Amino acid sequence: MEKSKLPVTFNKNYKPRPTLLRDRIVLVTGAGDGIGRSCAKAFAKHGATVILLGRTVRKLERVYDDINSTGGPQPAIYPMDLLGAKASDYHDLACRILREYGRIDGIVHNAALLGALMPIEHYDLKMWSEVIHVNLTAPMMLTQACLSLLRLSQDASVIFTSSGVGRQGRAYWGAYAVSKFATEGFMQVLADETDNSAIRVNCINPGAVRTRMRASAYPAENPQSLISPDEVMNPYLYLMGPDSNAISGTSIDAQ
Ligand code: NDP
């Protein structure tokens, strides 16, 4: 299938059908909180079996219970700290997914660290490495380990999470902003490499959303002035489901 890399404006009237993701196997990183939690629940509600990857098991268990209690397909919990995970851990994860499900139809690279908001002059080097690792290198390692599984899908979708500061640099956003610029670049490289395949690769910039990360970036902001993670799910569903089949290499704004 020929894919379009033209910039896409998300159609705000898009209505995902209830069975959009039926029989799909989708992995979400950072699935225990914020936007990742909403993705996991929204994907399950639309029929997907969701692999909940994250570092805080108690949060993942809550999402697992929520999905079960609403009658969604039974999810799976995969505890993993992206900061410490090695190539062999990603290889083990891919082997487990292959054994359990035989393929993977989608990945949402959602987990991220904010790091600190401070001038480059004072930016702590250890924090710099950690933010770049969790936000950029870990999604690369996970993607690399899962590419052969994505190729076993009829149409697979890989979604990276970008940010406004990954499009236009902003003072004090340091490693976080740089990691999001690099995420956009990585997405484009991978989209080009998978152009002649059934795999599509895109970015979403969720925009300002009421989460823990947003609150730590903007402590003085009234959280009630922001939309909730559940309210930005339609663009994620669109990119994860077959309606976006012909779109790859683009970055869309959820708001
Ligand atoms: P949250 O802080 O609410 O959620 C981040 C998730 O990532 C948490 O589940 C967290 O786990 C997980 N995580 C962090 N570090 C690791 C790690 N080392 N290993 C595994 N999981 C980890 O943030 P948001 O929901 O706001 O952010 C989701 C995505 O959206 C991020 O990529 C962010 O950059 C992006 N974004 C968000 C915006 C917003 O306004 N909220 C705006 C633009 C982009 P735990 O719960 O255990 O800490």
Image (spheres, rainbow, N blue to C red):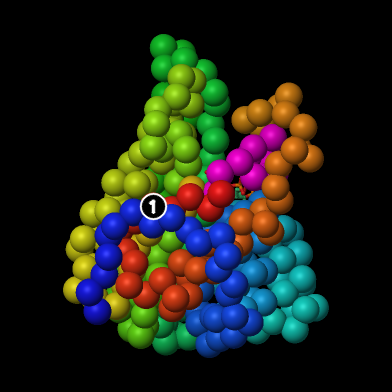
Q: Nearer the viewer, residue 1 or 219?
A: 1
Q: In the rendered structure, which amino acid carries the disc numbered 1?
A: Ser
Q: Nearer the viewer, residue 100 or 23?
A: 23
| Label 1 secondary element | strand
For the question of whether residue 232 can be seen, the reply is yes
The residue depicted at 46 percent of the width and 19 percent of the height is 171
The residue that mark 1 highlights is 251
Q: Locate the N terminus and report the quarter of the image it occupies.
A: bottom left
What stretch of residues is rendered in magenta?
206-215
Residue 124 rendering spot, x and y as whole percentages:
46, 21
- In the rendered structure, does residue 205 fall within the stretch colored magenta? no
The residue depicted at 49 percent of the width and 20 percent of the height is 172
Q: Nearer the viewer, residue 87 or 10?
A: 10
Q: What secondary structure characterizes most of the magenta part?
A: loop
The quadrant where residue 117 appears: top right
Q: Residues within 10 Å of mark 1 (few under 14, many from 20)?
A: many
Residue 33 rendering spot, x and y as whole percentages:
67, 54
